[in-house]
Each structure stands twice: as C-alpha cells, then as structure tokens.
Image (cartoon, grey):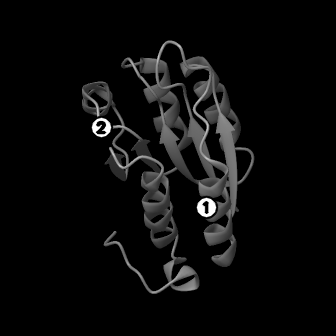
C-alpha cells in the first residue's frame, strides 16, 4: 500500500521538479512509521503525468500527492484523475496564478490544495493523506483536520 508523489516541471526551462533529498527522506520515514510506502515520480510534462496516473491503479497506490507544475488546464489529465478514483492532494511549491487557474479548471476536486509552502507543502500533504487513510495515530499525535 503506497502513497505516490507525482511532480511535473515548474516552468518551460525545467526538466523535472526534484524534491530535496532531505524532504524525500522525511516523507519516506513518516510514511514508513505509519505502515505505508512512498513512491516518487518526477515527470517531464503533462503526458508523462498522465502515463504515471495510468499505472497507479495497478500498483496499489492508495493516495496521490500531485504537483502538476505549470499546468494548462488539460482535459486528459482531469479525466485520468477522475478515472483513477484515487484520492489526491494537489501540491504547488510556489503560490502562483497558474496554480489557481489549474485548480479552478479541474473537473475532479482534490481532497485539498496546498499552495505556496515550498517543500514543506509535501510534508503537510503527507500528514493530511495519512490522516485520510486512518494512519495519523501511527505516525504522530498531530491531526490536521480532515
């Protein structure tokens, strides 16, 4: 049972959005304490994100943390989010109008949107995901209100 983190490029010059190793290590450790695994996939573009979403239903993914990057509203991405049926949180490292436009255009609503907290947004999103999956007590005594 796992939590997938899918990230896409943050701008036209970016090849992929890489989370700092320290943050990935913290996410893996916190999920492990709750009996979950974390898989990380950095995608080059929206079609790569869609391809990863196609595979999440078959690999035991229970929850998704998704940073679509600079996301132009994309009906295919929205359709795959709906089709997957996997609950997700949209994470945007930087607060931006592009993130707000993508959120407003989505046909399927994420459980939450975390916008503008940098890498710390992933830590917060993981806490929400673990609580949603009923694992918050395994991880710590902090409840984030889901």
Would you say 125 lies left or right of 86 here?
Answer: left
Question: Residue, x 59% and y 18% (percent of image)?
Answer: 47
Return the residue nearer the eye: 105 or 98: 98
Question: With respect to residue 112, does 99 lie above or below?
Answer: above
Q: SS for tag 1?
A: helix
Image coordinates for residue 99, horizontal then vertical, percent:
32, 31
Per the image, the residue denoted by label 2 is 95
Question: Residue, x 50% and y 78% (percent of image)?
Answer: 136
Return the residue nearer the eye: 50 or 92: 92
Quadrant that contains the N terminus: bottom right
Badge 2: residue crowd in 10 Å (few <14, some 14–19, many ≥20): some
Badge 1: residue crowd in 10 Å (few <14, some 14–19, many ≥20): many
Quadrant that contains the C terminus: bottom left
Return the residue nearer the eye: 114 or 61: 114
Q: CA distance from mark 2 to mark 1?
A: 21 Å
Question: Residue, x 55% and y 29% (percent of image)?
Answer: 8
Image coordinates for residue 32, horizontal then vertical, percent:
69, 71
Per the image, the residue denoted by label 1 is 27
Would you say 30 lies left or right of 87 here?
Answer: right
Image coordinates for residue 37, horizontal then vertical, percent:
71, 62
């Amino acid at each position: 049972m796992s939590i997938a983190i899918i990230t896409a490029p943050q701008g036209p010059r970016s090849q992929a959005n890489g989370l700092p190793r320290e943050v990935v290590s913290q996410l893996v450790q916190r999920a492990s304490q709750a009996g979950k695994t974390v898989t990380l996939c950095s995608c080059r573009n929206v079609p790569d994100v869609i391809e990863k979403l196609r595979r999440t239903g078959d690999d035991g993914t229970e929850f998704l943390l998704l940073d679509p990057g600079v996301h132009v509203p994309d009906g295919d991405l929205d359709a795959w989010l709906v089709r997957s049926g996997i609950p997700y949180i949209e994470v945007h490292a930087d607060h931006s109008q592009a993130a707000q436009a993508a959120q407003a255009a989505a046909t399927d609503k994420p459980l939450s949107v975390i916008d503008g907290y940098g890498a710390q947004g992933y830590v917060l999103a993981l806490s929400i995901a673990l609580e949603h999956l009923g694992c918050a007590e395994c991880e710590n005594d902090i409840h984030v209100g889901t």
